[in-house]
Image (cartoon, grey):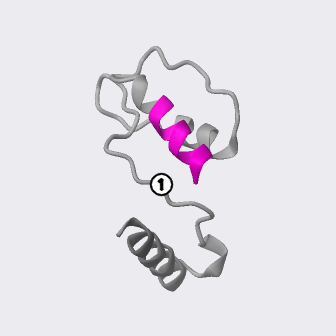
Amino acid sequence: GDDDLRERIITAVEDAIGPIARPEQVVFTPELPKTRSGKIMRRLLEDVANGDELGDTSTLRNPDVVDDIEAKVSND
């Protein structure tokens, strides 16, 4: 299930990069926040992961995806 896949991802990152890169959290989401031109808004993902206030989301193709990711991060 998801827990097994989550652990395999964490192990793969540790094996490939080292323990310093071990992710604290792995969240599965059907979509990532993208601009209208299709670029992933990594800044928003970082803000969500750090619990920071989100900046401007007006250029997002689907702003609702950020709410979904925030909910999943807070539930994990």
Disc 1: which residue:
27
Judge by depth and name the residue closer to the eye, 74 or 20: 74
Magenta-highlighted residues:
67-76
| Residue pictured at 62% horizontal, 26% vertical | 54
Query: How far across and how far down the image is residue 15, in percent?
Result: 50, 85
Q: Residue at x 60, y 39 (%)?
A: 48
Q: From the top left corner, tell me how far across and down residue 55 is, in percent.
A: 61, 22
Image quadrant where one finds the N terminus: bottom left
Instruction: Indicate left or right for 38 with 29 as reference.
Output: left
Horizontal relation, residue 35 to residue 74: left or right: left
Nearer to us in this view, 72 or 41: 72
Which residue is painted at 61% across and 44% down in the image?
Answer: 74
Residue drawn at 48 percent across, 40 percent down: 69
The answer to which image quadrant residue 61 occupies is top left
Q: Is residue 31 magenta?
A: no
Give the percent coordinates (x, y) of residue 7: 48, 76
Quick one: which residue is furthest to the bottom in this view? 15
**Residue 10 location, x and y as percent?**
50, 74
| 15 in relation to 61, above or below | below
Q: Please state the total of marks drawn on the protein image.
A: 1
SS class, disc 1? loop
Q: Is residue 38 above or below residue 22?
A: above
Location of residue 70 with respect to 28 vertically, above or below: above
Q: In the image, 50: left or right of 67? A: right
Which quadrant of the rendered structure holds the C terminus?
bottom right
Q: Amino acid at mark 1?
A: Val
- Tell me which secondary structure the magenta stretch mostly adopts: helix
Q: Nearer the viewer, residue 28 or 40?
A: 28
Badge 1: residue crowd in 10 Å (few <14, some 14–19, many ≥20): few
